[in-house]
Amino acid sequence: MTTDLNQFPQLDKTKFEQRGIQLEIGVPVTSAVSIGNNIAAGFGDGTIRIFSSGEKHKTLKAHKGVILCMAKDGDNILTGGDDGYFLKISLNGEINEVTNFGSRWVDHVAAHNGNLVCSSGKVVYYWDKNKKEPKSLNHDSTIGGLAFDAKGRRLAVSRYGGVTIWKKDYSNKWKSTKLDWKGSHNKVSFSPDGKYLVTSMQENVLRCWRLKDKLDFAMSGYGSKVKSFAFIGDTSYLATSGAIDAICWPFDGEGPMGRKPICLPYIGNKQVTFIEPFPDEKAIFAGLSDGSVFLSQIENENNTIMIRSFTGFEVSAIAMTDNKSSIFIGDMNGNILWTSIWDK
Amino acid sequence: MEEINRQVPVTVLTGFLGAGKTTLLNRILTEQHGKKYAVIVNEFGEQGIDNDLVVDADEEVFEMNNGCICCTVRGDLIRILSGLMKRADKLDAIIVETTGLADPAPVAQTFFVDQDVANKTKLDAIVTVADAVHLSSQIEDHHEAEEQIAFGDVILLNKIDLVKDENIEVVTKRIRKINPFAKIIKTTKCGTPLKEILNLDAFSLKRILEVEPDFLESDHDHEHDDDVTSLSFVSDTPLDMEKFQNWFGKLLQTKGQDIMRTKGILNFKDENDRYVFQGVHMLMDASPMGKWPENKKRSSRLVFIGRNLDTMNLKEGFEACKSE
């Protein structure tokens, strides 16, 4: 059998691909965060690559195995790996060990204002910025996700059977409240205004709680697991992956109950696998299972542009620099696009 | 240009405490075989394995909210397998150890239920390590021991050096009664080539045609009501597809908790293709698998392994599916 590459239609490169830098690392990109005008990306071989405009990217060997999770802490990068290490890494490459759990994975990391959190198995560890030893917060099942609210006062921990919200009371003691819903909860997030809490579940559905009265409801109809979601703007939409359209639920006014979402369609009938908001705009980057990435305005479905054409591999990370000038895209085969977003 | 999708085979290793699972895992991790195997062990399992490719897991069984009462999956496994799939080096196989008392069904079901897991990995086979010395008494005392035999595609009858030949015969018969299609390998210190245990493709429908189980008409000895047994049926009369689907669908829906495994090759009236299926509890995978070979008698064969099979009127149900 011979393969004739010419039999595939040659798709023109997008202008972003033409002017940007494209790399084929061959190792899955697992996560990416913006640190100022730089992007730090984590990889399946334990390396971190730091992309800055006008410079060649820097590669750091951080973990022995897969970088499972990443967050930013001021100007530093936090990473957790399947080698059991929780690391704090500076942009110039200084690596500090926060802790090490041996053969147990560090599944999730988060930070707020210098306070660090990670989870390993069923336990969340919280490092107050003024203390050396962490506080352990125990749960009955393995943790699916971690999230602070915008002010850093509440920490939501998703798990089997619902979410535990941790808060320090006036005497500085940790208190927890539980939001129960049967099933396995993964990624969790507060809405930017702190009024709602959303989780994505093992089933193809999102669960949402209105926190003032604990009223809960589902957002369903997805063809696959919702692996990525993000609130857009000041809680005007929740944009979600898990369908062949990007599904955007309205969260303004009385919330999404009884209202229809906006569905942003893309060419090719591929699943949306990654959502990243365009800061301060009602717009999203949507990454698809074939590697293509689109920028869409939520309230105008005709205003969609293709940022990257297909690679054949699921988009697993998208991050935009804080000055909104450059975008980083990575997929499960380590195909990377690092490009400026604006025409000169 | 589609992604070239190689699914990593996952072997489920089960067996009672002390049967020899750790011996086998140590062999898999230390022998010079030129392959990269990751092993997922339970933190409460037997001790003594330390290796970069060993992952600790809590056996967390989740119920799925899909209205299927026996549909439980291993949540930890979904998390760990998706993590392993992000590794830079590609794994040749993954082995999941379940503790002595755990029911292997949730592990098997995980591969049917989670799309990401199903895309990137595939259930290869359930391998049960059994202690030739103690199996008979374990089966009497613990329903889990019986279930592990029932689910196995391969049964490693270990420690045969400690048992007299005639007793090996007795144990083998006991295993056969519970599970007529498993391959039984007799070993000392789990000493069998790894190719006999790994990468068997036992869950592929094609494989069912290659390794046809003993579809013997079962004998009906007196048994305890809660014993795990097997029943098989053969028919040369073509089946009516609609009748079969109605009967079998309803059967799995209502009795899926008691029916642990099913396999079959079916000859439907007016169909040129062989239909092959296999199932774990109420989850089932079925597909036409090409034409019946020329010169070969077309006959339907069906095997059930489970509890309380004699209360399900299986024979009558199957007979009623015949097209004439």
Image (cartoon, grey):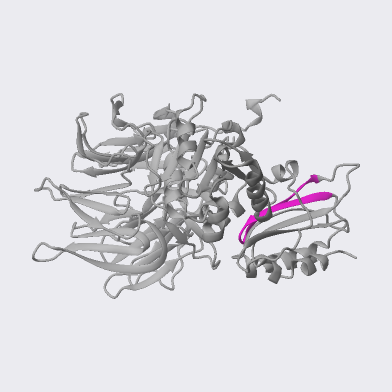
Depth check, front residue: A23 or B249:
B249
Image location of residue A205, percent across then percent down = 46, 62
Depth check, front residue: A177 or B135:
B135
Tell me if residue A292 comes above or below residue B241 in the rendering. above
Q: Quadrant of residue B70?
A: bottom right
Tell me if residue B236 comes above or below residue B309 in the rendering. above
Q: Quadrant of residue A343?
A: top left
Q: Quadrant of residue A17?
A: top left
Q: Is residue B279 magenta?
A: yes
Q: Is residue B270 left or right of residue A108?
A: right
Q: How many marks?
A: 0
Q: Is residue A107 left or right of residue B245?
A: left
> Could you tell me if residue B203 is visible in this image?
no
Image location of residue B16, percent across then percent down = 49, 50
Depth check, front residue: B244 or A162:
B244
Q: Which corner quadrant holds the N terminus of chain B? A: top right
Image location of residue B191, percent across then percent down = 55, 33
Image location of residue A298, percent across then percent down = 41, 56
State the residue at coordinates (64%, 70%).
B254
Tell me if residue A263 comes above or below residue A97 in the rendering. below
Q: Which corner quadrant holds the C terminus of chain B? A: bottom right
**What type of secondary structure mainly makes up the magenta span?**
strand
Q: Is residue B14 magenta?
A: no
Q: The magenta stretch spans which residues?
A: B273-290
Q: Is residue A45 left or right of residue B305?
A: left
State the residue at coordinates (56%, 57%).
B139
> Could you tell me if residue A192 is visible in this image?
yes
